[in-house]
Each structure stands twice: as structure tokens, then as C-alpha cells.
Image: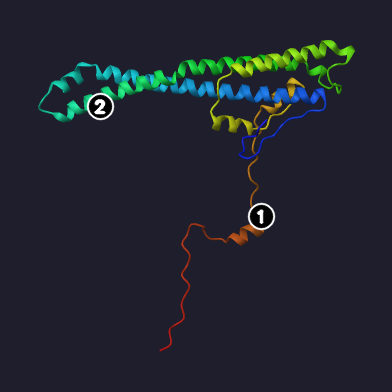
Amino acid sequence: MGDGRQGELKLFSPAKTGDLLRGWQLHVGRRRDMHERAGRRAQQWHYIVGSAATVMAAFAGSSLVSTWNADERSNGLALAGGVIGAAAAVLVAFQTFLDLGARAERHRQSAVEYKALLRRFERLTERRSADSPCGVADDEAFCRAIEELEAELHRVDSRAPVVPVRLAAKVERRTLGYYSTAEALAAAGTPSKRRPPPPPSDAEAEADGDGDDDAPAKPTPRAPKKT
């Protein structure tokens, strides 16, 4: 897995089953975050571009713009009407080409599938501490669950849309934490209150001076020039 920095590619080679599951869960958690952010961004741009195109198209087809175009005495109004109509057509074509609404839905669906995978990882938490690789006779059910999870992860990865490079690099740089209890997870999501800075000591106050910092400095008297 890469960390978003150029020139460095990190590969994960786990020696224990617990480490393998943690690596997969890290990948799934980051992918879910990426697609949620990408879906929201695409949905936001879908509304912005669609609203602008609708307003400009309605204004370009209004009777006011038609009057501007028919008025031969004012070339400026006719030019403004033509610019508005061309801009509306460009925005509609831009929206159709990018298909922002469908793109946002694809990212949302991928985020939902990754979230379902995270729930499956949570159900495997009790067995995560196993140090033996799969293949042990008395742990066939656990190994079969890992194989099914691997197949599902491959399916979701292959169907997920491409995430923008900057957004993917931003999420890759984030630090993800593991919490084993709901109380610890809730406490981690609570913002801590910032303590006010301590007042300056007497020595620092004397060093800063009694006067106002914004007051202009007094000019230093110059020695008279010798003639």
C-alpha cells in the first residue's frame, strides 16, 4: 500500500493472520473514506453545475433575451444574449460529459460495500489474535471465512470507480486508529478542549517592556557632526 508520497511504494508482507487482517482492514477503511469524500464532492459539483446550467438556459430562452436579440439598435444586448445562450449550452454539455450524478452514486455504492466489509472485519475481531496461518485443521471455519473475505474484497476493489489522485493521497496520509470498545471509539471522536495559554511570568513581562508593542519606537538621538 502506498502512502501518497512520490518515489516510495510500501508493500505489506504479514507473517501472522492477525497482521494480515489488520492490513486488509486498514485498506478497506481508507477506501471507504476515499469514496465517501469523492461521492460528496461529485454530488456537490453536480448540484452547482446543474443549477447554473438550468438558470442560464432558462434565462437564455426567456422573452427578455429574445428582445435583446431582435433589437438592432443595441449590439451589446444582442451579444450578451448570445454569450448567455452559449454558456448555458457549454454547461449542459459539461454536465453530460462528466456525468457527475452517476459518478457520485457509484462512489456512494462503493463506500457502502466497503462499509459492509468493515462490519465483517469487526465480526472477526475475536479470532484476529491467531498467530498461525490458514491451513490448520482445527481452524477450517476461520480460514474459510478469510478466503471468502479475500474474494469479496477483490470483487469490491475491481468494481470501485477511480478516486482523484489528490483526494487519495490526502486520505492515505491520515492516521487510522484501532479501538476495541465502543466507549474508546466514542471518546476518540470527542474533540478535546483547548486550554488557554498561561499568563506570562513577571520576567517575561519585564522583558517585553511596559509600553505598548504597537507604539512607535522612540528615535535614537544622533551625535552632532564634526565640522
Q: Residue 210 appears at what percent x and percent y?
A: 56, 61
Name the residue that disc number 1 marks. Answer: 201
Asked if 202 appears above or below 62 in the picture, the reply is below
Q: CA distance from mark 2 to mark 1?
A: 65 Å
Q: Residue at x 46, y 75 (%)?
A: 221
Q: Which image quadrant for residue 161?
A: top right
Q: Amino acid at mark 1?
A: Ser
Q: Residue at x 44, y 83 (%)?
A: 224
Q: Residue furthest top?
A: 141
The first of marks 2 and 1 along the sequence is 2
Instruction: Categorize mark 2 by other alpha carbons within 10 Å: few (<14), some (14-19), many (20+).
Output: few
Q: Residue at x 81, y 20 (%)?
A: 128
Q: Residue at x 82, y 13 (%)?
A: 142
- Is residue 179 among what the camera can see? no
Q: Residue furthest bottom?
A: 227
Name the residue that disc number 2 marks. Answer: 83
Q: Residue 227 appears at what percent x and percent y?
A: 40, 89
Q: Amino acid at mark 2?
A: Val
Element marked by disc 1: loop
